[in-house]
Structure formats: structure tokens, C-alpha cells
Amino acid sequence: MQAIKNAVAALIAVLPERLSARLRAKNYRYRLADVPPAPVAENTPVRLYVAPVNFAGQGYQWARAAELLPQVSAVSMQYVKPGDFGYPVDNAVPVNVTRFSRAWQKRQFEAVSGNFTHVIAEANRAMFGTLFDTGAQANTRAEIQALQARGVQVAALCHGTELRLPSRHKEIDQWSPFNDESWALIPGFEAKALSTRQVLSDTGVPVFVSTPELLLDWPAAQWLPIVIDVERWAQADAPLQHPVLRVVHAPSKDMVKGTHLIEDTMRRLHEEGVVDYRVVRGVPAADMPAVIGASDIVIDQFRIGNYGTAAIEAMAAGRLVISHVHDQVRDHVRTVSARELPTLEATPDSLEATIRDVAAHRDRYRAQALAGPEFVRELHDGRLSSRVLAEFLSPAGR
């Protein structure tokens, strides 16, 4: 049966696009009309392509940060699927098109390799679908090398799981999700992180990481700060004003954020009337500023030890962020900016006492919340990320 499936797949792969799309439509929901045009590079000396995941809209934001540099234009690409959060992106491509449209794969590679001078490859994920696959494995190494052979300057950008080594992380934090032996995904994460390391070593590309915690996994990397639209998150009202403090927790991944570790504590505080606690899931990106703006406190994460997009957005809104952040991260932020990260430290063990203290002494914590917008403007409005990208995007490197 598998041999028949392989034969059918091979036949479809060599058919003209208009025929193969029809044959795939039933199983893969891919139509010829779904195939977007190739990205267009502007007429600038430096032309950057960022692909293919755009996690939390960051590929798009880093592209805009790059364009703060003189003589630089940029295009972000993302493979999208139903149910995505709707983050902005320049070149959205349905995921089944990337997987099954050989015409799109070839056209996309030719457009990028022939018209862009620089590429930032995100998350060790395939930028050109299965075009460079070997066996069952997406061959990102071959993608990078093919771009380099065409004279394109390539850098890698790691967001988290694809680089973070579980066997390392669990040794430095008792709350690490990788200490949970029942989590069946851990061996896969370990293998993926080792694979990413091999790709980075084999290709020798510059490496950027989105959070300082990942510098422990690749010390030669540069921190490329997350970028947000600061004005979109700004709020006019002061924090910690509601009679019963409104607390929001918006876990992207419960296991990683530690939602189950704080659930009993937060339910108890809610039932006692200390806080009004709300867990937010599945809210479109466009609606999140209103959700965060209506809160007093945002509880972020308790297992990885970094701070990411959700915490930055909450700080930009002037809300008090409570999270578990490693000293290594706080020290790196201080070294880069001479600023203190204005998130309130707590672990699952200390969260209840921390929130009760905030509720009892609001004035003591209000200044920390109000430090958030200025901190975000300094580190996360795109200017610092632009400076970090400047050396890689230098026309002299061409």
C-alpha cells in the first residue's frame, strides 16, 4: 500500500501544476488559486528576505526593523494555515502550497536567490517546502547552501525549541518543563535541537536568537530583541487601579508556560476575591491589546526562564508582569541596556505570596509597572534590533 502511495505521489509531482493541484485538492485542500505570486524585491542595494514562520509576527517586525537602516528593504514570509492568529506578514503562503506545489517551490527559490541579497532563515524550518528534501527530512542545510551558492548572505534565527537543548535546560532550573518525564515530546525536542546545532555548524552562518536565554545554547549568537508596535499597546490609564485586581494569563503552550503549576493558586485567589483571574486562549492578535489593557497584572511563564512577546506587550501597556526569569537573562539585559527588566519575579511556589503582597501594597508595585513602557521603547521598538542587524546587512558584505 505504501509503495502505491509513493508511486502516486511521484506521478503527481511531475504533472503540470493545474492538474496536480486538482488531484491534491481533495486530500490537501490545495487549489491553484491558493498559490500566491513570488515575493518582489525593491530596488535597494540590500534586500532582505525573512522566512518562514513569523512566530508572534516577529518575522514581519524584524523586516520593518531592518528597513530602519539606510538602503535596506525587506520582505517577510510565513506559511499559514486555518486558525492562525492573524499576525501581519508580507508574503503569506498556505502551508499546503509550500508542501505540495512544486511550481511554487521552484519559483519561490528562484525569486529569493535571484533577487534578494540577504536571507534570515527562521527556526530551522524549510523555506521552500519540500524542494530540497532528502528522504522524509526537510533539508534546511541544503536550502542554506543552495542560497549561498547563488551569492546570497544567509543568517539563522532561532526562536526557542529548535535550539534549546532539554538536557541542558533541565539542569539549571527545577521548574524546567524538561524535568517532566511524562512529557512525550521531550526526546523529539532534544533531537531537533541537536539537528539545528549540526546545521548551524555545517553551514557556518551567523546566528541570531530572539531571547537572551538561548545564548546558553549557542554562545556565539547575537541577541536580536523581539520587536512590537509600542503605540498599539499603549494605555492611558494607570495600572493596579481596579478594586479587585484583574489578572490575565494567556498561555500559548500550557506545558511550557506552566499553567497547570499555577492553576490551583490562581483559582483559590479568585474564589477569595483577592483577584479576578482570567485565562485567555485563542484570541486573535488584533484583539489582544484590549484584553491586556483591561487588566492590572499579566502572569506570563514559570518554566523557561526568559521573557517573550507576551510579556513585552504587557509591559508596553504599563501592566505589572509577573514571571519567572533567570538571572542570566536579567544580567544580559542590564549589560546591553543598563536597564533593569521590570518584571516581578515569582515561581509557582512564591506566586501566591507575591500576588497577595501586590494586592496589599499597590503603590509599591505601581512604579515597576509604569517602568514597562519606557523599557520597551528602549529595547523593543525596533531600533535596537536594527542596530543588531546592521553588520549582517552591510552592503560591504556583498
Image: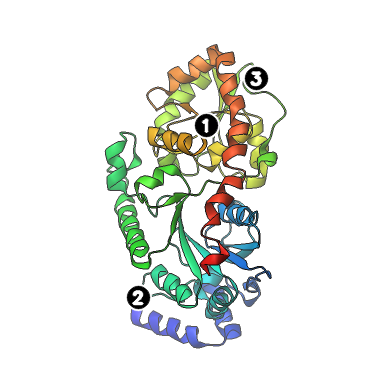
Of mark 2 and mark 3, the one earlier in the sequence is 2
Count of picture labels: 3
Q: Quadrant of residue 394?
A: bottom right
Local SS, label 2: loop
Question: Which residue in the protein does label 2 denote?
Answer: 135
**Residue lying at 60% horizontally and 51% vertically, measured from the top left:** 85
Residue 11 coordinates in the image, percent (x, y): 46, 87
Front tag of 3 and 1: 1
Which residue reaches farthest top? 360
Examine the rendering and report whether any part of residue 185 can be seen: yes
Report whether 391 appears left or right of 347.
right
Q: Amino acid at mark 2?
A: Gly
Report whether 147 appears left or right of 112.
left
Residue 63 coordinates in the image, percent (x, y): 60, 57
Q: Is the image coloured rainbow, by chain, by secondary structure, or in one colour? A: rainbow
Question: Which residue in the protein does label 1 denote?
Answer: 339
Examine the rendering and report whether any part of residue 87 can be seen: no
Q: Quadrant of residue 136?
A: bottom left
Closer-to-camera residue (215/233): 215
Local SS, label 3: loop
Residue 344 coordinates in the image, percent (x, y): 49, 26
Q: Quadrant of residue 205?
A: bottom left
**Residue lying at 52% horizontally and 36% vertically, measured from the top left:** 337
Question: Which residue in the protein does label 3 denote?
Answer: 242
**Residue lying at 64% horizontally and 72% vertically, measured from the top left:** 36
Of mark 3 and mark 1, the one earlier in the sequence is 3
